[in-house]
Each structure stands twice: as structure tokens, then as C-alpha cells.
Amino acid sequence: MRRLPFFLLTLSVILYSSHPSSAQPTPPRLGHDPVSDIVKQMTLEEKVKVVVGKGFSVPGMRMLANDSTPDKLAAISGHTIPVSRFGIPSVGMADGPAGIHRFMMTAQDSAEGLFSTAWPVGTLLASSWDTALVKKVGVAFGEEIKSYGIDFILGPGANIHRNPLGGRNFEYYSEDPLVSGLTAAAIINGIQSQGVGATIKHFAANNQETDRNSVNEIISERALREIYLRNFEIAIIASHPWAVMSSYNLINGVYTSESPDLLTTVLRKDWGYKGFVMSDWFGGKDPVAQMKAGNDLLMPGNPDQVKTILEAVKSGKLPVADLDRNVEHILNVLVHTPTVNRYAYSNKPDLKAHAQISREAAAESMVLLKNGNQCLPISNGSATIALFGNHGYDLIAGGTGSGDVNKSYAVSLAEGLTNSGYRVDEGLARRYKDYLADYAAKHPKKPLIQEIMNPTPYAPEYVFDAGSIGPRADAADLAIVYIGRNAGEGNDRKIADDYELTGPEKDMIAAVSTAFHAKNKKVIAVLNIGGVIDVTGFRDEVDAILLAWQPGQEGGNAIADILSGKVNPSGRLATTFPVRYTDVPSAKNFPGKEFPEKATTSVVGRSVPAEVTYEEGIYVGYRYFNTFNVKPAYAFGYGLSYTDYKYGDLRLSSADFSGRLRATVTVTNTGRVAGKEVVQLYLSAPHHSMDKPAEELKAFGKTRLLQPGESQTLEFTLLPRDLASFSTGQSAWIAEAGEYTVKIGASSEDIRLSKTFRLAESVTAGKVNRALAPKAKVEELKPVAGR
Ligand code: BGC
């Protein structure tokens, strides 16, 4: 018999195996064949593998495992289960919003340099009011995620700053849904431009850590639509995140991960979302309800969930169509992941370049709150600075918990000042460093998970003996008092010794200010904090205040860039600083009421049912302060510059609104140094059938770097939705007829120009499905009629 040439033999084997007419067809493969074909051929067990994660494991310890294959990457937060018959690999998910978080770094990881860039935290990034800058961070972040072989980053966090004590506020952006939504969209667009997935979280109304797994948030439909969902709506529509993470809490009596209203009606039907939804880790209670609601993937996954879902489908409790839908949602996204596309990751991101971007983003976002007698920037480039405060020598780059980052270093302000050419009072520095080293030796870190959830507290503020500060004022040209704060997952902050300064901090500021002012020398406060603190207790004692938030690993350099004037501050507050904590409208409903008699214990520990009613309704942040005439310490949108700006020539494209309206305004740098100005467009709307905040932010923009004398015209467009409020009765966004005022401001209380236009007839700017109604009417705060 004539033998076939080898290549024909091979070809025939290939042809035979790809066109099998025999009983064993080749299963369709992810990435090659339609997802619907894969789902059609999957067994029930295979489908369940797709919708439940691989289990929870930390190096050396695998808990609740659903699958025995090794994790693709060690010490990241989660993996999906592979289904090899269809070419579906396991994909990896890592925290978190401010940089990649691994549970631990082995000695080998460190030796290989597998560190991550610590970016400025969300609250600081949002203070840039510069979506192009945030996107640039996102692009670099995405490159890093991909270089480390990770498919999804578990961020950004986009919840609203409802209350200053929220323990995870640092991970979130703002009290305002527009700033929050556009900042989230910018970072997501940047991250996803690199071909990896972002996961916007925690959907929704996860505004406190106290009882986070069991708290029922009672919120009106209007407050949900205008505040607590609006941020997500803006971000999701503008950036299509690959994944959404549902939150732990309940909204109006239903766990968010079990809520068809939230996950299907609002997210998919109203907003057209096409990605998939994953639960927060161990979130929700009933896997069948989660599957039905459209919580496509349960993370990190555990064997009980697998069993429950299998049984529910077999018994008819869970329609297989629901399971199929969830599987399709997940696979439609996984097909784009680097792992499915066999991306050969390098483990070598450009950490040097990313550090520069981190520094730039931090400096461009910091907010100068006070600058008495223009004492900043520090004109003497080689001044000797007396730096007081533990954290001046030990930067708080970011918050704790899953939002912590495996950075290789964090530049303290002491180092940043030295790098910039200043002299740091060495005697003082030595005292602090010795004190901090001694404390660290006496307080070793706890085991891994305990340390993540309940970090070892920082050293108490170093206390000086009386009389030892005076000589420092002789030796140095000026003083910096440095206040540090940290918080994170699992705990909210408290008022005493956290929102308020501690006794030793107050004493330090008082003693330093007295000693330095006696010598006619300035005192500058630097706030390295993750959430709002009381500033009224000390702001009159110091000459200047720089709000650095938690600035990422290059923090000390970025702060020095502002103090030296290398960068002119252009950050603006994305969250209000009140005069008193009790001025915040949510203060009387935070963190809510507990029902300890109904406590239960589960995989997440002891859960105490709790409930919090959002009585303040839509009056969150500046919406409250402006409408109810409560003066804040520093208003939303506020921030100083080293130069001045003049606003002029506000023009509206028409005096009557029909479909859209354009507003233009020209900003001129009238000072002596170059700078960037944030221009804010607020709208005051008529209030006939619905009450309205006095002003609401509808658009914002940042100028380019304007040289002295230079001008730039910014343009904003208003659409019907921008004029509208949510009418619960009509389940629609309604813009009421009447006179509207466009207010161009340098902050929410510093309106520079305004002009009115009319809307002749009321307009419906979008009808939505009825969803998420509270069980009983929420009695909400309302402004007095006739305002
Ligand atoms: C946090 C999430 C995080 C997840 C995975 C949860 O405890 O709430 O933000 O992404 O853990 O680490």
C-alpha cells in the first residue's frame, strides 16, 4: 500500500478530529466558539463550576476549596474554577482600588520584585477633578495588573461618602455622585484599555463598615436613584466595567446580592449593563436567591454553595434558564481576559514609570486648605524644617484591609523634604525614628488574616517633655505639624481620638505653634488622612494646612512638590469638612440600630442584624449644607492655589432650554505663577412639585496649566437629565418647567458667575422601572417650603 506523505497524514488526522462524524464531537471552546454553544453542551455540574468561585485560599492554607487545581497566582483574593473540556481556564482576581494587594509576599516574591505601585487613594484622586489624569493612572494600573498575570482588579470602589466616619471612605471618591461616577469611569476606562477587567464595587449603598454583612439600609427610591445609584449609573454607562461587585448590606430588606430589583431591573434593564456581577466575599445568604437575582458569580465560592445550587436546579427551585443566563454573562466577559487569550505575562511592570505617575497624580490632587499670609510655597529652598508628628517619618500611603497595597517603599515627608533640598532638623528626626523603631519592636505584627482585618495600631503620638520644643524653634526656619490617620475594611472610625485629634496631637500643635510664632516663624499642618477629621480645633493655630489625604507610595515627594511650589496646588475638596461632626445630616443615623438578640453566626463570623434609616434623603454633603444654610469648615469644591483666577464671560447658548444647552466660561490666571483651576457648574432648579437642593453639581472641568495672564474658555453641555430630579410617583426623571440658574463656582459656596434660562414645559428625561421600594415610607428631611 502506498504510504501517505507525513503532512497529509497529519492533515487528515486534524480534519478528522475537527469534523468528527463519530459519536464523540469535539466540545466547543471558549474564545473559538459561541458562548451559547458551550452553555448548550455543559452538564449541570459544569455550569455550577462557572458560577461559584474556587474557594478561599491563602498560601499554605486552602479553605472551603471547590477545586483541587493549583491557583494560577498565589495569595490573591480569588479565582474562578476551570472547565477544561471547553477550554475555560481559571482566571484570577486581585484587590484593590489603590493598587494590587496580595495577602502576603514570600521571600521569593520580594526577591523577584513582585511589588505593586501604591497609587493615591480614591478620595485623593477624586480631589484632582481631572478625569484625564485619573485615566492616566488607570492605564498604568492596568499595565501593572496585566504584567502580573491578573485578569480582574477588584476596584474601583465607588460608594458615596455618606458620613465622615465610614471606615472605607478612603477607597471611595466623593459625597457627590457626579464626581464619584466620572472619576470611577476614568479609572475603569484606563484600566480596561489594557485588556484587563475592572470590578466596580460595592453595589450599592455600602456606606458603613459597622455590621457590614447584616445592616439593612432603609433608603427612599429618590435618594437611591439620585445619590446611591447615580454614581454607579454614571460610571457604568460611561465605562462598561467588566464586572460589578454586589455589596454585603441589604437595601430595604433585601441583600443586594439577592435583589433582582438591583441586579437585573436597575443594572441590566434600566442601565443596559452587559458584564457580570460577582458577590462580595462570602456576601449574601441564599445562593439560590443570588442566582435568580442575577448575581452571576459567587465569590470566593464554597462547597455548600455548589451543593445548594445543584440541588435547587434538580428540584426545580432554580430554573436552569437562570443558571444558563448567569453562565453566559460570565463567559461573555472571560473570553476577553488575558488568561483565556494566553497572554504571556512578564511579572515586570514598569514600576519606575508608575511611581512617577503616582507622584504626579498625588501632587495634582492635594488640597491646600489654608495659606495665611501666603506663607506657602516655602520660598527658601534650603530652609531647615522642624518636622513634628510620628507620621512625618512614617507615611500612611493608603488604608488597611483589602485596600492595602504591597508596595516596596513609601516616601515619608522627612525623605521628601530632603529629596527636595530642604534640611530636616536632625535632632528631632532622630528622636522620632528611635521612638518609632522601639514601638515597632515591641508591637510585632499579628498573623496574616488578623492583621488584615484588625491591623496593629500605630504608635501613639510621641510626647515631648516641656521645654524641648522651644530650642527647635531657634534651630529651624519653620515647623510642620503632621497628622496621620488610618482606617479600613471591617471597622468604622470613631469620634474621640480619630475624627477629633488626640490629646497629644492637640498638645503638639499648641506647643509648636506657640514656640514658633514667638520667634515669628510659620507653622504648617499636613494632613495625611483617609477620611474627614475635625479641623476647627486647630486651624486657627497654624498658618497653613495642606490636605494630602493618603497619597500613595510617593507621598512624601508629592507633598514636598506642593510645599516647595514645584507644583501649584489644584486639588479641590470632593467631600465637605464640617464645623462639627453633628452638623453632618447622617450623624444621627450612623451607624444605626443593632438587634443583638437576633445575632447569627456564619462563615463571616457573628452577624448582628442592624438597620439604618437614611432620613437625610438626598441631602448629602453640600446638598445639605447649602440648602439648610449650615456653614461648613471647608466647603465641597474648595481649595486654594498659589495664584488667582478671574472668571468671566459666562454665556449660555440660549435663554430657553430645548434639548440641550451649552455654557461657556473663560478663566484667566491673574496671579504670578502658572496654575490649573477647577471650574464647577452648579444648577439651581425650580421646585414646584419636588423639593430640590439649593445647588447641584452638573459638570466640571479643569483648565490646562495656565501661565500668568493666560486664559482658557471651558465649555459644558447640559442635557434634560441634568435638569431633572427623580419622581418616585412617576418612576421617572422629571425636569420641571420654570427658571433655572447656572452657577459657575470655584467651590459650592463660592459662586463667581450665574445666568438663568427657562424650560417652557416639564420634560420627562427617562422613565425607569419601579424598583427597590422601601417597605414603609421613609420620613425624610425636607427644606422649609418657600425657600
Ligand atoms: C471586601 C472587598 C474585597 C473582597 C476580596 C471583601 O471583604 O469587602 O472589597 O474585594 O473582600 O478581598
Image: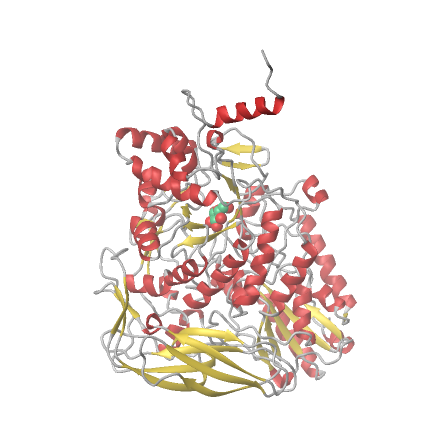
Quarter of the image where one finds residue 756: bottom left
Quarter of the image where one finds residue 738: bottom left
The C terminus, quarter of image = bottom left
Q: Is residue 780 visible?
A: yes
User: On screen, 541 above or below 4?
Assistant: below
The residue nearer to you, when weighing 624 against 718, is: 718
* Horizontal side, residue 193 vs residue 299: left or right: right
The residue nearer to you, when weighing 133 against 715, is: 715
User: On screen, 460 above or below 214?
Assistant: below
The residue nearer to you, when weighing 481 against 120, is: 120
What residue is drawn where x is 40% and y is 20%?
23
The image shows a total of numbered marks equal to: 0
Percent position (x, y) of residue 690? 25, 73
What residue is drawn where x is 42% and y is 81%?
663
* Horizontal side, residue 601 vs residue 572: left or right: left
Q: Is residue 97 visible?
A: no
Percent position (x, y) of residue 698? 40, 73
Percent position (x, y) of residue 394? 67, 59
The residue nearer to you, when weighing 563 against 351, is: 351
User: On screen, 553 above or below 567?
Assistant: above
Percent position (x, y) of residue 405? 60, 52
